[in-house]
Image (cartoon, grey):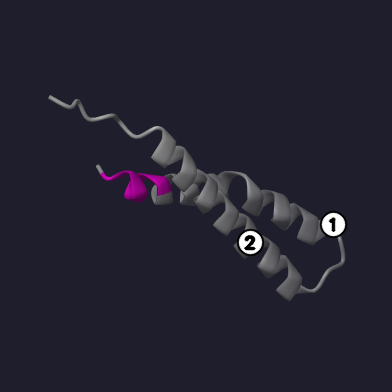
Amino acid sequence: KPWIGQGIRFGILLALVAPIPGFMTNYAVIPVPHTLALNWILAGGAQAVLVALVIAAICQPKTDAV
């Protein structure tokens, strides 16, 4: 499968596991406006997708040149 699609899927799963639960916990504990918490979640999700794309680009299978 193409590495870009794999990276995006991995990034979405990574965002669901790491930054989103952490930011939701912070929102429940720290008194901040909901718009700030939403920006935290969106920025953390975007960072997770970008990191996953970099990982997918680095770890893509090499094609054998004949």
Residue 10: percent from left, percent from top: 44, 44
| SS of the residue under disc 1 | helix
Mark 2 burial class by Cα count in 10 Å: few <14, some 14-19, many 20+: some
The secondary structure that most of the magenta stretch takes on is helix
The structure residue drawn at horizontal position 75% and vertical position 70%, both measured from the top left corner, is 36
| SS of the residue under disc 2 | helix
Please identify the quadrant where the N terminus is shown: top left
Mark 1 burial class by Cα count in 10 Å: few <14, some 14-19, many 20+: few
28, 48: nearer the viewer: 48
Amino acid at the residue labelled 1? Val
In the picture of the structure, the residue carrying the numbered disc 1 is 29
Number of the label disc, if any, that sits on residue 64: none
**In the figure, 14 relative to 36: above or below?**
above
In the picture of the structure, the residue carrying the numbered disc 2 is 43
Q: How many marks?
A: 2
The structure residue drawn at horizontal position 75% and vertical position 53%, both measured from the top left corner, is 25
State which region is magenta: 2-7
Residue 37: percent from left, percent from top: 73, 66
Residue 19: percent from left, percent from top: 65, 50
Q: Earlier in the sequence, mark 1 or mark 2?
A: 1
* Discs 1, 2 touching: Cβ within 8 Å: no
How far apart are the two marked residues, 1 and 2, measured between alpha carbons? Answer: 19 Å
Amino acid at the residue labelled 2? Ala
31, 52: nearer the viewer: 52
Q: Residue furthest front?
A: 66
Q: Is residue 17 toward the left or the right of residue 53 in the image?
A: right
Does 46 appear in magenta? no
